Amino acid sequence: MGPHAAGVVLAAGSGARMGADTNKVYLPLAGRRVVSWSLEAFSRVPEIGVLVLVARAEDRRLVEWVLDRELDGVPVEVVNGGATRQESELRALRWLASRIDDGAVDTVLLHDAARPLVSPTLIADVLHAAREHGGAIPGLPAEDLVAVAVAGGVGEIVGEQSLEGAIRVQTPQGFRAPALLDAYEQAAREQFLGTDTSSCMERYSSLPVRWVRGEQHNFKITYPHDLSVAEHFLAASEYRT
C-alpha cells in the first residue's frame, strides 16, 4: 500500500458569535451535530487514510457522544486543540509527525468543522491538486468586493476600486505533509501567527499553491441564521442523515 492522506477537522473554537451555551459545532443540524457532517464527508473519500478531530478538552464528552452515536464505525483520532487555530493545527501535525516522517502520510487537508456542507467531491479535488502541485486552496470569485478609500477617518468614501481576481477562501486547504509540518514548526519557533493555513505556508514554504473552485454551499456557520440556511440546503439536496 502506498502513502495516504490525512484529514484534519478543526473544532477547537468557541463560536461565541452564535450566542449558544455550547460550542457551535455540536449544535444540531438536520438530525446530526454540525461537526459530524464534515467528518462523515471526509470518511467517504477513499484516499483519506487518517481522520483527525481537533477539539477542546472541555468538549470531550460531546466528542465521544458524536463519535459513538453519529459516526459509529468511522475511525477518528482526537487531539486536544490549542489557544489559537494555528496552535491547534500544529498539535494535529505533531500528532501525525511520525507518520509524515516515515512517508505513510503524504498530504494533509485542514478543514473548519464549522463548514459542515463540504462535499466529498471538493475534498477529493483539493487532495488531488495538493498532491500534484504541492498545495491547494478552494475558493469562489469575490466579484462583489471593492477596495474603499476613506478620508479623514470620518467615514467619507472618496473612491472605490474593484478587487479583480479576489477570491473568498474556503477549506479544506491541503498541502504536502512534510513541507506543511516544517512550515508550522518554523512558525512556532519564530512566534508567527498567520490568519489561516495558507498564510503560514506562504511565509515559510516555496510550494506552489493551486486554486480549486469551491462550492457555494461550503459556507461557514457563524451566526444563528446560518444554521437555518444550512437546514434548507440539506432539505433540498441529496444529503441524507
Image: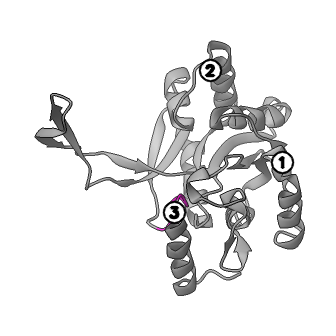
Which residue ends up furthest to the left in the rendered image?
Answer: 158
Query: Label 2 to label 1, Cα distance in Å?
Result: 27 Å
Nearer-N-terminus badge (3/2): 2
Tell which circle, 2 or 1, labels the residue nearer the N-terminal end: 1
Q: Main secondary structure of the magenta part?
A: loop
> Which residue is disc 3 drawn over?
218
- Amino acid carrying mark 1 in the image: Glu
| Residue 235 x/y as whole percent | 56, 85
Q: Which of marks 3 and 1 is nearer the N terminus?
A: 1
Count of numbered tags: 3
Rendered location of residue 103, percent (x, y): 79, 35
Q: How crowded is mark 3: few (under 14 residues within 10 Å), some or many (20 or more)?
A: many
Q: Would you name the residue on which mark 2 appears?
A: 187
Q: Considering the numbered disc 2 on the image, is that residue within a helix, a strand or a loop?
A: helix
Amino acid bearing label 3: Asn
Q: Give the range drawn in magenta.
A: 217-222
